Image (cartoon, helix red, strand yellow):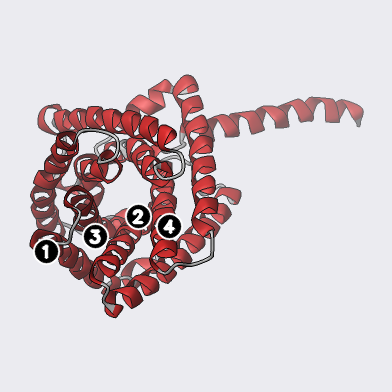
Amino acid sequence: MPLVMNTTTPHAHELAAQATALRLKNFPIAWFAVIMGLAGLTLAWARTERLFRLDLAISPWLAALTGLVFVLLAGVYTLKVIRHADAVSAEFAHPVKLAFAPTVSIALILLASVTQSGLPGLSWWLWSVGAALHLILTLYVLSAWMHRGGFEPAHLNPAWFIPVVGNILVPIAGVNHAPADLSWFFFSLGLFFWPVLSALLFYRLIFHPALPERLLPTLFIFIAPPAVGFIAYYSLVGEVDAFARILYFVALAFSLILFSQSRHVLRRRFFLSWWAYAFPLAAITLATLIMAEDSGLAFYHRLGALLLAILTLVIAGLAARTAVAVVRREICVQDG
């Protein structure tokens, strides 16, 4: 009996080590979309606490949680870069996964926004690294789109907004960290590509087969460009003018359209892409709270509070479902 134990135990350890290594190899960069959702929730709660003069201090705890999760994810992905550089290269060469690469830089930019009031020095570093990295990744993705070839309409999905339209996020913290023209540069770059990609995406959705099941949640990303555009534009000009209202109401219209279709995606199998619900919902929530603060109208106060409640429940549900998926080893599998 001891002989059997001695021969099988090392084999079991070896299999466990191989399984762990395989999960690390399949650790997707799309995990950083979790940070986008958590940071958006943090910013929305911080704005709510100020707008409604709440005695609650939820946003600092959310900020700490967001930072801890980012450190954890960054550590794991760095380990993947070291041990499985080939898998990282394949991810950056993949026609669909490539679009999620800038979630890393966007996470840094959002963390800069989260920390700018309490830790301005850290915020400056996060913003500087995040903005520079995002510009590099934007140029890399644009170069791939223009020169690599091999892209097909089936590869096109709303996640393609992430690399270029993510530039619109830069001014939110950038107005406090750099000359205004630099923020206007990023804003203009992102704003240019928003209608271009919107036209391409609607062509793909109308005239080509439906999105794969795992990519259906990315439809909610349509909300993000106008909502984030409104927030960034407000940060740049400091008021809600006619153009700001256009951006906000386009975002609100897309929110209504996608909320009315949510039944088509909520019954689907869980994928990490479900986190695509979080940040767009956080963006329209934050935009509505800014409208409430700027206008003083009760309608926007009530709508902002409602959206915040929905956002909080959605992210709590996503966090719980993600934890279950991790325990069941449904994530970090081949093409998962």
Tag 1's secondary structure?
helix
Q: Amino acid type of disc 2?
A: Phe
Q: Amino acid type of disc 3?
A: Ile
Q: Nearer the viewer, mark 4 or mark 2?
A: 4
The image shows residue 89, relative to residue 300, as above or below, that is: above
4 or 3: tag closer to the N-terminus: 4
Is 148 displayed left or right of 39 in the figure? Answer: left
Q: CA distance from mark 4 to mark 3?
A: 21 Å
Q: Nearer the viewer, mark 4 or mark 1?
A: 4
4 or 2: tag closer to the N-terminus: 4
Where residue 336 appears, x then y in whole percent?
43, 45
The image shows residue 201, relative to residue 298, as above or below, that is: above
2 or 3: tag closer to the N-terminus: 3
Q: CA distance from mark 2 to mark 3?
A: 9 Å
Q: Few, some or many C-alpha atoms within 10 Å of disc 4 (few <14, some 14-19, many ≥20)?
A: many
Identify which residue is drawn at 44% across, 24% down.
81
Q: Few, some or many C-alpha atoms within 10 Å of disc 2 (few <14, some 14-19, many ≥20)?
A: many
Q: CA distance from mark 1 to mark 2?
A: 20 Å
Q: Which residue is mark 4?
A: 46
Q: Amino acid type of disc 1?
A: Ile
Q: CA distance from mark 4 to mark 2?
A: 15 Å
Q: CA distance from mark 1 to mark 3?
A: 13 Å
Q: Which residue is mark 2?
A: 279
Identify which residue is drawn at 46% across, 44% down.
118
User: Which quadrant of the view contains residue 112?
Assistant: top left
Identify which residue is drawn at 16% across, 59% down.
205
Q: In which quadrant will I find the N terminus? A: top right
Q: Which residue is mark 3?
A: 223
User: Which quadrant of the view contains residue 207?
Assistant: bottom left
Q: Which residue is mark 1?
A: 246
